[in-house]
Image: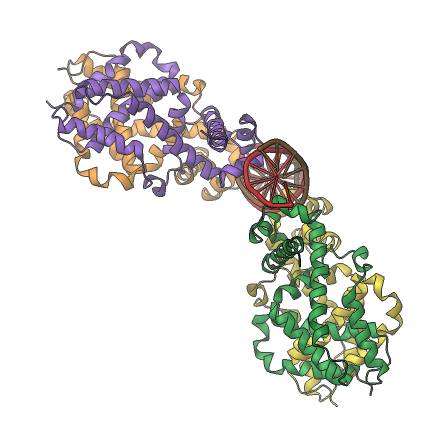
Chain colours: A yellow, B green, C purple, D orange, E brown, F red
Amino acid sequence: MDQIANKKVLILESALELIRENGFHGCPISQVAKQASVAAGSVYTYFESKDEMILELYRYVKLVVLEEIREKDDPEKNFEARFFDFWNNLTSLYREKPAFQSFLDQFTSSPYNTDTVQLEDDPWGRWTEAFFRAGVESGQLRPLNPKILSIMVMGSAISLIRYTTYFKAKTASASKDLHLIPKMVWDGIKFQ
Amino acid sequence: MDQIANKKVLILESALELIRENGFHGCPISQVAKQASVAAGSVYTYFESKDEMILELYRYVKLVVLEEIREKDDPEKNFEARFFDFWNNLTSLYREKPAFQSFLDQFTSSPYNTDTVQLEDDPWGRWTEAFFRAGVESGQLRPLNPKILSIMVMGSAISLIRYTTYFKAKTASASKDLHLIPKMVWDGIKFQ
Amino acid sequence: MDQIANKKVLILESALELIRENGFHGCPISQVAKQASVAAGSVYTYFESKDEMILELYRYVKLVVLEEIREKDDPEKNFEARFFDFWNNLTSLYREKPAFQSFLDQFTSSPYNTDTVQLEDDPWGRWTEAFFRAGVESGQLRPLNPKILSIMVMGSAISLIRYTTYFKAKTASASKDLHLIPKMVWDGIKFQ
Amino acid sequence: MDQIANKKVLILESALELIRENGFHGCPISQVAKQASVAAGSVYTYFESKDEMILELYRYVKLVVLEEIREKDDPEKNFEARFFDFWNNLTSLYREKPAFQSFLDQFTSSPYNTDTVQLEDDPWGRWTEAFFRAGVESGQLRPLNPKILSIMVMGSAISLIRYTTYFKAKTASASKDLHLIPKMVWDGIKFQ
DNA sequence: AATGAATGAGAGTTCATTCAT
DNA sequence: CATGAATGAACTCTCATTCAT
């Protein structure tokens, strides 16, 4: 990775961390710059505007997630095994890098997430769709639109992580059963 | 409802609508006040600060959701029927009042959602927990912690609505299968 | 004049003075506010933006000029006398309030002076046109378009004042003949 | 012209065009450099500072004007003919190179135009003064200080051009009489 | 000489909050 | 109680200038 890409990533990671800690409100460019050890003005060497920086951060985070998940997927395994790998890898990733999950969550429900953004090329979206399509075509998943399956699975997974992240205070008592959720999800989507 | 409560609600609804349209960024007190037909300063007669207003809005929205869902629940029915009612009522409510879902989503992933907030008395949380406990005790749901069941169900439902709301552009092709999701969820949580 | 109009004028006069001293570059809102003894943010209570403030200043200055000149014009006199009054009053006014002349000069040659601005209602422009039309109709001026006469006269007058203002250093030696200019201008426009 | 002078001129012309289009505000060094196809930093190889660049531009523009006007003047003609040549050449030049007139106008009324600047050697000022002195000495102009005559003539000419440039929207109706202005000016200054 | 990334002071502007009316 | 003008800190963004390459 060259120098320029390095600085860009440095700034993005700085923004990511600040957004996790304080939300979009709490990541003024001045702070982003300071945490990335650059001058405030320098951010504008790499990004046209703060909005554009946030959008690039969105693309960046989804790419990193894709790389991590794809590299740990083994297409040789049968689909049930791949599914539980997928679930575990995704929840582990988000637990290890809570800023990723927090940012994606905030971004999704924010006004940044416009129609234009959704229509951009989305390698992560394409990969997950292909993943669930493989499950359907192997006969191990219900014969449904892979997007639907993706919605259901990702929804449960993200909701689980949100719960354990945001509602730490509440879920303490329930934590011993949390590992049962992937089994339940699988029972919901598998070919009966 | 007396005059004061009325004005409070007027201000809260005004904020709610602005947050849906523009996010937390896009709801300055001046706008909230204008849309509620009061002076900016008057907001501070009813709320200590903007933050406190947002918190009260969170409590308010959850209360309204609880009322709507509880009143349409019929505890006399068998649990499977109650489950599908619950699913339909919740998704209908969020579709009819998108500002509710949008606000809850943004709030949950925002820094407003502190530990302190989560530890507050939460009638909506208590009700859903009791709802799923009834399912378990009737023998129709897996014998799991009702919180876990709640997480899984609400996660899928919210994820579905988020998808149809935020990702309108993408789900067009998948929409005909969307009504299958509750069946899948039920298959995941029912006693096998 | 009420309080609000007073504050507006205070801010406008402050901007006017700063522009005379330092040009458009040298009148940051922070300075304008400080000189008007208000907070920086307060300027935006009275004006939508800095640009809008400059435009209002343009309208304001032209109105004041119009009032001063019109009130000292005596339509009962013959036109030659009115002409020399007009010349003297205008040059006196600009000499007494150099900020007026300096601002109008800078504004005219600046990008603020868009087509849209020129097409606004312009009482000062209407008055001067009517003034010279009266001269033509009385038979004392050449039978020309009053706008042309206006251009020629105002051009000479303004150029004279610019010279004495900006080029103080150069005109010292010529100053004893400066009072001859109005006579020359009159000889140029009078009916021969 | 050597390489260095060439680049200087390239940068000056770039600044000139930007100032015409957007005023002093709208000519950041970065733009000037880009339009001149050099790096931003390189401007500082040729000019000490932006201010110094503007001052050199002023000198440059006046020199070009002088060259153009002087070369088209024929001292053998009688002064009346030379006067109308001068008028036509000057107005043509400004009409063909509106950036010249626009820049001179903006510069003259700006804070760049300090006493120090006015006291610099000024070949264009010297030439015009000599021009009008010749008219006086030939007996064809009123026996006045040539500076005064210069003020009056240049004022009318510039005012005419400003009008046709800045106030395009207003002068449409008057345009057919515009060519009468030089005759009027001549009648004002000629020996009666 | 030429480059252009980096700087950081300072610009215009917003907005939560206060308080005299 | 209600008002909304006033505040000023904090925001995003620009740009003249520098300097390592």
Left or right of D31, for residue A24 = right
Along the viewing direction, whichever of F11 and B38 lies nearer the viewer: B38
**Residue A69, picture quadrant:** bottom right
Depicted A137 relative to depicted F7: above or below: below
Residue at 16 percent of width and 14 percent of height:
D138
Quarter in which the C terminus of chain D is drawn: top left
C84 relative position to C17: left or right: left
Residue C159 horizontal side relative to residue B115, left or right: left
Q: Position of residue B107 (x, y in %)?
A: 70, 59
Q: Nearer the viewer, residue A58 or A38?
A: A58
Q: Residue placed at 35% from the left, 36% from the top?
A: D99
| Visible residue check, residue A127 | no
Count of all numbered marks drawn on residues in the image: 0
Can residue B142 be seen here? Answer: yes
Q: Is residue D59 left or right of residue B7?
A: left
x, y percent for residue C117 = 36, 40
Q: Name the foreground residue: A112 vs A41.
A: A112
Residue C184, quarter of the rendered image = top left
Q: Position of residue D114 (x, y in %)?
A: 44, 21
Residue found at the far front of this picture? B2
* A159 versus E4 height, above or below: below
Residue closer to the observer: A172 or D78: A172
Name above or below for residue C189 compared with residue A93.
Answer: above
On the image, the x and y values in percent for residue B127 come to 79, 71
Q: Quadrant of the N terminus of chain D?
A: top left
